[in-house]
Amino acid sequence: MADCLGQQLGNYRLISLLGSGGFADVYMGEHIYLKTQAAIKILHTKLTQEDLQRFLQEAQTIAHLRHPHIVRILEFGVESVPFLAMDYAPNGTLRQRHPSGSIVPLATVVSYVKQVASALQYAHNERLIHRDVKPENMLLAEDNEVLLSDFGIAVVGHSTHYQSEHEVAGTAAYMAPEQLQGKPRRASDQYALGVVVYEWLSGDRPFRGTFTEIASQHMFVPPPPLRSKVPTISSEVEQVVLRALAKDPQQRFANVQAFATALEQASQRWPAAMAAPIGTTFLVYSGHADQVWSVAWSPDGRRIASAGDDRTVQVWDAVGGSGGVAAMGTRLLAYGGHSHWVHALAWSPDGRFIASASYDTTVQVWDAATGQRMLVCTGHSAGLNSVAWSSDGRFIASGSWDKTVRIWDAATGRNMLTYHGHTDVVSPVAWSPDSRFIASAGSDKTVQVWDAMTGRLLLRYNGHSDCVDAAAWSADGGRIASAGDDETVQVWDAITGRLLLRYAGHSDWVWSVAWSADGRCIASASRDKTVQVWDAVAGYPIFNYKDHVSSVNAVAWEPDGRRIASASKDRTVRVWQAG
């Protein structure tokens, strides 16, 4: 179409070619009287009478749009060829600004999305669907404000028989399932914008291939999780994007503006987390004289308690470390009431007390601020491996080498119940979130779920092939994660025992597991010297923390989900960015 240069269409003379597409060329045009500049889009095909009428109706509708982030249509016509005269955007498109494969900073993405969503919401309120949201149709004005272009134009192009399968495939990369079925709606534009956001954040679109392959994936295949491509993206941001990409339009946000608002809020939720990449070490605590077996956050997230083979429990300040420089944790208290190794501890739900369990066969309850001993619970006949406080604060459970689990009254220390269901050493014990049930496990290769008040066995999980060293409930009480010497973590239904996921990313025994507060991720600690963070539903790895130089014995997630504390045989506890 280079021979169009110098020609006049309407009131504009074509000065230079700005770009070419599958069904249109765009020229720089100059108004013959006003000498103002405009972008002139010329379709490659002549329209049928039906297409012409449709084109005119679309153009008339679009010409009435008045929004700061929508390109204005200045003139249209069908003289020798169909054409549109539009505002000229001197800084090109967002595709040119961020070529394929580029990763765009989250703050920049949020800024773009707010502008585009504002334009789309305005159009939707005017009963107009864009149908072709993609970076090529997002222009940059002189002040670098985003202008959304090509409302309805793609519909004209697609209605002809000219367009090649290649061009359709390019557009199909952003098409919602219902649009591919010929039933576009407002939510289809939200889906397309979700694909654009996914691409900007990860550097890649969720689906690639031929037109047929892309269409099939949009219809039936979940998009690959964002954090599998860019682990530094927070789970909250990922959740927002994946909701916009829901296959069912009813499961997306109520409107495109709600999508933009949710993305902005998720990006601002944890400013510190955004500033620090996942795995950044904030604190290193080196107060123990021997290996550390247990670590736990206070309920308010401001203190950490750790315990180990030096026979102490130490409470220290968990606040500190910034700018990528790890600080040294400051000790607040050291409790030395035990006469043997301390392998487990638990905070009371109100954060006032700590229960610690030792190979000296006792559970001791003491004041977390002063170290004053409040209770000593005796009755086990062998060393203890675990201790857990019920979420209602009323009871403490402990597991022992004597093959039993005992439940104690947290106020009096009285032994309320002894569970004898295991045939070998009991390692982990964990209360359900509602304080009704206990999951206990150990060297008999089973995890047993039982009623904490009656001791009645409800479920025996037999999925492990070796000793089970860890067990933890999800926050909603619906799932249990267990791990052990078979080098796997297994996630299963807490009611039926049905296996939901088997994670095999570790190369040695897995000592500890912890759920994120939202139940989306699990952190697992292993004798292979790593802590691995992974998706609790799909099992894909998110991050592998390798800063410990020896076996990692325990892992705990900060209550608000930003940081993880891990304890090691190397005598340190490290606090690091979780996501």
Image (cartoon, rainbow, N blue to C red):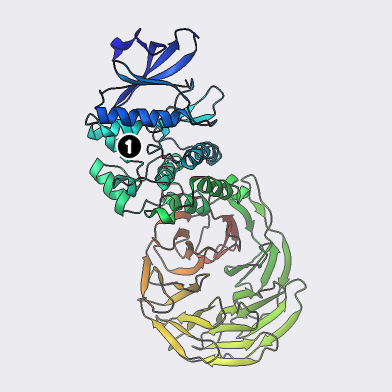
> Whole-percent x and y of residue 305?
65, 68
Q: Is residue 99 visible?
A: no
Q: Residue furthest left?
A: 161
Residue under pointer 1: 171
From this view, report whether residue 204 is shown above or below residue 236: above
- The residue sitting at 32% across, 24% down in the picture is 24
Q: Nearer the viewer, residue 53 or 107?
A: 53
**Which quarter of the rendered picture does the N terminus lie within?**
top left
In the rendered image of this protein, does residue 562 appear above or below residue 54? below
* Residue 251 makes an appearance in the image: yes
**In which quarter of the view is residue 337 placed?**
bottom right
Q: Which sits in the foreground, 129 or 382? A: 129
Image position of 97 (left or right of 436):
left
Q: Position of residue 12 (x, y in %)?
A: 41, 12
Q: Position of residue 383 (x, y in %)?
A: 56, 84
Residue 388 to residue 124: above or below:
below
Q: Please report the residue visible at 48 percent of the width from the left and 7 percent of the height from the top.
A: 33
Viewer-side residue, 278 vs 86: 86
Residue positioned 66% across, 51% down in the render: 321
Which secondary structure, mark 1?
helix
Q: Is residue 357 above or below residue 558?
A: below
Q: Amino acid at mark 1?
A: Thr
Label 1 CA crowd tier, 10 Å (few <14, some 14–19, many 20+): some
Number of on-image labels: 1
Q: Nearer the viewer, residue 232 or 545?
A: 232
In screen coordinates, is 464 left or right of 340? left
Residue at 59% of width from left, 58% of height from top?
574
